[in-house]
Amino acid sequence: MGAGIAAASAAAGCRVLVLDADRAAAERALEGVDPECRDLVSIGTTDDDLDAIAGYDWVCEAIVEDLDTKREMFERLEAARRDGSVISSNTSGIPLSQISDGMSERFRRDVAITHFFNPVKVMKLFELVPGPDTEPEVIEAFAHFGAERLGKGVVHAKDTVNFIGNRIGCYFMLSGLHAAKPFLADGMTAETIDAVLGAPVGLPPTGLYGLIDLIGLDVMELVGANLAQNLPPGDRGHEFTEFPSAEKEMAARGQLGRKTGGGFGRRTKRDDGSRKSETFDLVTGEWRAAAEPDLEGVPAELGEVLFADSPQGELVRHIFGGTLAYAASLVPEIADDIANVDNAIRWGFNWVHGPFEMLDHLGPARVIEFLHGVGTPLPAMLATLEASGQPTFYSRSADGSRMQLMPDGTVTPVAGAPVRS
């Protein structure tokens, strides 16, 4: 991640210093830098060259996701950086309050979370999180640099565990592993689960298992542990912070995903040199030939499978519908408004629609009627919408401005850039 941030900053014309624990690791960071920008990038080690950061405006930490290790590094960086510089962490989920607790007043004033999604060169999302003492000018400077110099989609998040994108996206994955179990036991294949959790609901073709294979079970296990420790009491996510038994066994034997040659799926070479696709059967615990997904009866119209009277429809209601409901319960906890949530999920997880845009597409009244019909309490923002009398979360004003429903029931313009990228 540090190498990706360095490459993006150099491509934007900035002078960059990359420091790593050893010089060879720092040199590898140069591989991702465009050749025409390499003269802007210097390298060094954190032991020998830390004082050189005094010549730079922005000091960005992107080391291992361990709180104690990060705090130790920040103490060293704080002693070396100059007045007037800003400092940030690229952590994907550790709250800034834990990083900055007990740190100097200068540090707390100048620090923020600047969370990029990987690969930095490709992914649009840039989550920006202030601490309680961060100066507004610091956040303004980061937002301007992220949008105008780096060309990223800046999302303003609150200092809560996993921020916006990973809070919702990881809920989809972790809850999905649990919710899929009975469907697998009833004979639904992993291929069908991935397919129905793809294009039919506006998600990438990786679906559920393919996405986790891309990220890695080891990473998801760390995510679950962080959520277990930092989710607020009563949060629905507590039910899903540990893997189901089959996934625990996969992680224990190192069957982690693409990085280890196979997780839920793999491609192997035949004797004739051709490649075959295989799927790990979570019920039998054995590898089998990949099967075609069963999408018979799945409506072609985007999202309509949520209301289908079929096993696929029930699966989607549990996993994708549950994720939409979870997102609707988190505003204003994780963000001040729904536009930041929608942007984070579209830019970070490549959904066609963010959660609230998708609810608008489905018809909020229809969703509310369904939830009432099955006796499910409305999540906060759906309850706010029902009470407000507004038909949708987004609307247009008389002058054509995009408007959004706020947590207090008022309707205000969407701030900054349009919701659509």
Image (spheres, rainbow, N blue to C red):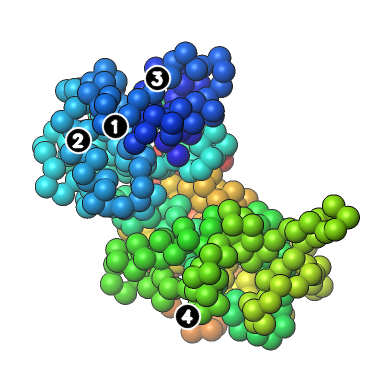
Whether residue 83 is visible here, answered yes or no, is yes
The disc at residue 46 is 1
Residue that mark 4 sits on? 376
Upstream in the sequence, badge 1 or badge 4?
Answer: 1
Measured from the top left, where is residue 78 in percent x and y?
18, 33
Mark 3–mark 1 Cα distance, whole angstroms, equals 13 Å
The mark lying in front, picked from 4 and 3, is: 3
Amino acid tagged 3: Ser
Callout 3: helix, strand or loop?
Answer: strand
User: In the picture shown, does residue 81 fall above or below 354?
Assistant: above
Measured from the top left, where is residue 339 in percent x and y?
46, 47
Spot the residue most to the front: 271
Residue at 52 percent of width and 75 percent of height: 249
Measured from the top left, where is residue 106 in percent x and y?
13, 33
Callout 4: helix, strand or loop?
Answer: loop
User: In the picture shown, does residue 1 fall above or below 13?
Assistant: below
Spot the residue most to the right: 272
